[in-house]
Structures are given as structure tokens and as C-alpha cells.
Image (tube, helix red, strand yellow):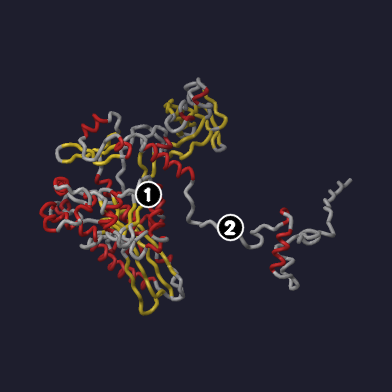
Amino acid sequence: MPRPRPVALQLPVDDNPGACSVPRGGGWRPGARWARTDAPESTDVESQIAALPAHAKPPMRELGRRSEAAVHPYRGDAPAHQAMSVEATVAAFHASPLALIGKVGRREEVVAACASAASLGIVVGMAATHARALVSDLDFRPAEPEADAALLDHLALRAVRRWTPIAAATPPDGLWLDLTGCEHLHGGEERFCQRLRAFCQRAGFTARVAVADTPGAAHAVARFGRAALTIVPSGRTVEALGPLPIAALRLNSVALTAGRKFGFETVADLLPVARGPLARRLGLAAITRLDQALGGVAEPITPREDAEVPVVERRLLEPICTAEAIERVMGDLLADLAEVLQARGLGARVLRLVGLRIDGGEQVVAVGTSRPTREVSHLLRLLKLRIDRIDPGLGIEQFTLVAPHTEPLDAIDLGAVLADETLVRDPARLVDVVAGRIGARAVYRLAPVESHVPERAVIRSDPVDAPGGWPEWVRPVRLFARPEPLARVIALLPDQPPRRFEWRGTTYMIVAGDGPERIHGEWWRRDAEVWAVRDYYRVEDDKGGRYWVFRRGDGFESETGDLSWWMHGVFA
């Protein structure tokens, strides 16, 4: 007897939907009613949509519009947890009083102190022994002027690339930014200063920002002004510098001592004094600093230079489309690029060749090297491996060769070569050629890592680097990245190797075994490895195959493992 067919659910259809714009019988389509030729005006449609109940209104995405701005695909707010972690790190760093100690002459002095240390009486220039005696729990750390200078140089380079083309570092703790002609790009001077302080706060720094007519005045107001953000109006430099101490003019210690001797405390005290007597009292350098701050003497900013990417170009009289012609152009471009790299003392690590076709399309190929080089023959050999990937179409009329990644390349020491000494051959050229054929990721060298866990004891490294020393542990020739489970294992607990197991659907009968080699988990990584134990065995089956298997657990305590068996490697 045939089974009865299920009855379809019939929903009731309201013949009078009222003000609802959904067509009778369902099947609503966005815009179907007002898309007809006899559709009402758009204002009527909007009013009809507004009159609909909340559950019947069509979504904004179906109407082809949004009521909110779309999120930028490449620019988003930092995760909340990341911002909180930065703030927590900065707060923890400034929780205890901190002072930096540096060697000045023959004694150690305080070269920098945080606000908490300053409130306890620690000042710059104080002897380190005096500071330790004054505050017993003061956190003393050695000053690193080289690291500070490197950080300032990095910030100056970032400023050149993102904010203004003229930026320079002013060691030990400042930056000069010339906003002339570019302040409108950042919403004005005040808005740019606020964004700059927010950037420094996100990076974990406290910053004081000042804008003035001269670099000297901005330097003085930023360090000795009352507010963390000060914008000196144009033409009011003297008024802003007047109440500041004379140390704001970047005077040396001799000039500062002389100024205190003659009663000069603020910059306003220096202004009415004639330049001749003032120069005899404080020195000519102090007069120069004063004139630079007031704008009487120019103080140009030497900007941080952003190294340009080496690039060469060739425009052809006629388009080319053969491999021989493209190879000839590659050789010419490499010869020109080698001269540019040699003049800068650089070597190329990555080359990108761009060919512009007559139909407007571009053909781009790239090669990389293991070490910086500017040898034309070697680079040409690598580029020739990419000719078959270039589709010339109707012809290529312009070529551009760019070296986006370069590194310093000095002269090669040929003393050992001239002395006929045996040298270890550099595998960099061979690696480059092989990587050009099969891919850079397919060429690597295994290097040991300090770990007892077998799968963590090996890492892929640069094939050019010298191999490190390997431990004398017995390990299989082929070690699996992840152990594979064994089934139907027969073994005598707690210390005997397995006598039989199944792996990948095949049964193996074991005739010999050696072990166990006990390896404990790395408890500092995660809690699950605190008591974890593996017992490894080298076993041999009746067909001569040798395998490396292990059992989880020591056979006594359940916390050490579940007594499951795993295959981890195969011997030769």
C-alpha cells in the first residue's frame, strides 16, 4: 500500500493587506511595486515605507543603501584588549620611581628621572650614590643613549614618511617637525598636535608638544613650558620665551653657571642687555642660541633622509615580444642597476621587473636572493628563469627594474684567495637557482632547537645559514610533524615495548624492541604538560622495518597519560 503524501502547509493569504507593501500571496521583491511605470513618486514611496510596521519594513541592504558609514577595509580601531594591555604595561612601568644612571666623567649621575622620582627629590645631575641614599626603593637602570638615538631616528623616519618631509631627531629626547605648508593636510596645527600626542600615548610615551615660529622657540616651550600642548601664535615668540629659564636656550654648563653668577634667571633678563657685554659674560654661543630662538639667526633643520628605492627604466623605440629581446633588455637594466647599487654601497635582495605592454597591461616578475648581491650575471640568470611567465601580448614598450629590498654590501676580502687557502664554498648561488625553479619555500635547512619534545626540537631555517650542533640522541630518519595513532596494540605494562599494533590499516608483528626513553612534557608551556610523560621505543617488525613509537603515560599514574600508543617516526 503506497504511503500517503504529506500535505503541504497552506498559509492563509490576506486579501486586504492594508498599508503593507508586500504583494498579495507573499513573494516580496525589493522595489517591485514602485519599479513599475505607474509607480508613485519617490517621496510617496518613502512615506509608505515609513508607515509600515517595524516587522514589515525592508532591510536597508535590500534597498541598496545604508544609514551608517561603511567601515574602512584597511583601517580599523585597535582591539580593546590591545589598548588595555599597552596602558597596563605603561602603568606598571611607572608604578615605582625610576631613574636612569649614566657615567658622566668619572662618576655616575642621574641622567633622567620619572615624575614619581622627581617628586621624591631626585633631579638630573645628582650623584647615583646620593640618589640611592635618598630613596632606598628607587628603581635604578643604566641609560642606553645608543638605543635612544636609534629609536629617535626611527621616529624621525616615520615622521618623514607619514607627516612632513622635513623631520629630524634632536637627541637625547626630542623631534623637530617642520609643518610649513603641510599643516592643513592634518586638520590644522592643533589637531595635528593632538593626534601626535595620541600616537605617543599609544606607543607608551609621554610627550610634550609645542609649535612656534622657530625651532629654538618650539624646543624651549616644549621642555620648559607649563602646558603639555602649546601653540605659540605667530609674532609672539618673545612673549612666550620671556618667563622661561635661560636653560631653555640650550646653553652649556659654563654659560649656565655664569648666568646664575650674574643674576640672569629667565630669558627676559637677557633681552635688555647689550649684546657685547652679554657675550663677554655668557659667551658667543649663548648669543647665537638666543638669536636662533628669536628668529634673528636662521637655524635650518637637516631632515632625516629616507633612502629611495633603487630603480632603473628603459623606454624602447619599438615594442618587443621575443624572449631574446627581453633577455637583452634585462641585461641592460641590471647593468644600470648595479651602478646605482654600487654608488650607494648596497646589494639587492629582491628584484621586481615590470613590463608595460602597448595595450596598457603590466607584466610583473620578481626574484629574490639569499644574500645581498649586485652581480649582473647571477641576477640575470635568476631573471631568465622568469621569462616564460611574461606574456608580451602585442609587445612591451617599457621596462622598469626595482630593488625594493636592499642591504648594505661591502667589499669582499680576497686575502685568503690570494694566499691559495681552502675556502668553504658559499651555497647562496645554488640556493637562489634552486629556489627560482621550485619555489623559495621548498628550499630550507633543518636546524636544532633546545627542546626535549621531538616535534619541537627541529625548525626550518635559512638554507644559507651554517647548521648548528645536533645532540647525540638517536632519532629516526623521518620524523613526523604530528604523531599518528596506533590501534589494537598488545604490550606488557609498564616498561615493555609493543608486540603487535595496527598502523594505517596494516598489522605489524614486532620481533625486537629497545626502550623506554622517557621524555617529560614542557611544564612551562601549558598546564596539560606538567605531569605529561612519553615512553619512546625503537621497535623492529618481522619484515625488517624499524619504527619509533611511544606510549602516553608511565603505566602507573593516570595523570601522566591515557596509555595510548602513537607512531612518531620511521628509521631507515
Q: Are marks 1 and 2 in contact (CB under 8 Å)?
A: no
Q: Residues within 10 Å of mark 2 (few under 14, many from 20)?
A: few
Q: Secondary structure at mark 1?
A: helix
* Relative to 75, 142 lies left or right: left
x and y, in percent, of residue 176 in the image: 29, 56
Q: Which residue is mark 2?
A: 68
Q: Which mark is residue 456?
A: none
Q: Amino acid at mark 1?
A: Cys
Which residue corresponds to the image point at 22% horizontal and 56% vertical from the top-left? Answer: 410
* Res 512 seen here: no
Quick one: quadrant of the C terminus?
Answer: top left
x and y, in percent, of residue 398 in the image: 38, 73
x and y, in percent, of residue 86 in the image: 42, 42
Relative height, residue 331 to residue 91 (above, below): below
Q: Nearer the viewer, residue 59 or 390?
A: 59
* Res 54 seen here: yes
Which residue corresponds to the image point at 46% horizontal and 40% vertical from the top-left? Answer: 481
Q: Residues within 10 Å of mark 1 (few under 14, many from 20)?
A: some
Q: Which residue is mark 1?
A: 200
Which residue corresponds to the image point at 47% horizontal and 22% vertical from the top-left? Answer: 495
Task: Tally the numbered discs.
Answer: 2
Quick one: quadrant of the N terminus?
Answer: top right
| First-in-chain label (1 vs 2) | 2
Q: Amino acid at mark 2?
A: Glu
Question: From mark 1 to mark 2, how far is it between C-alphas?
Answer: 30 Å
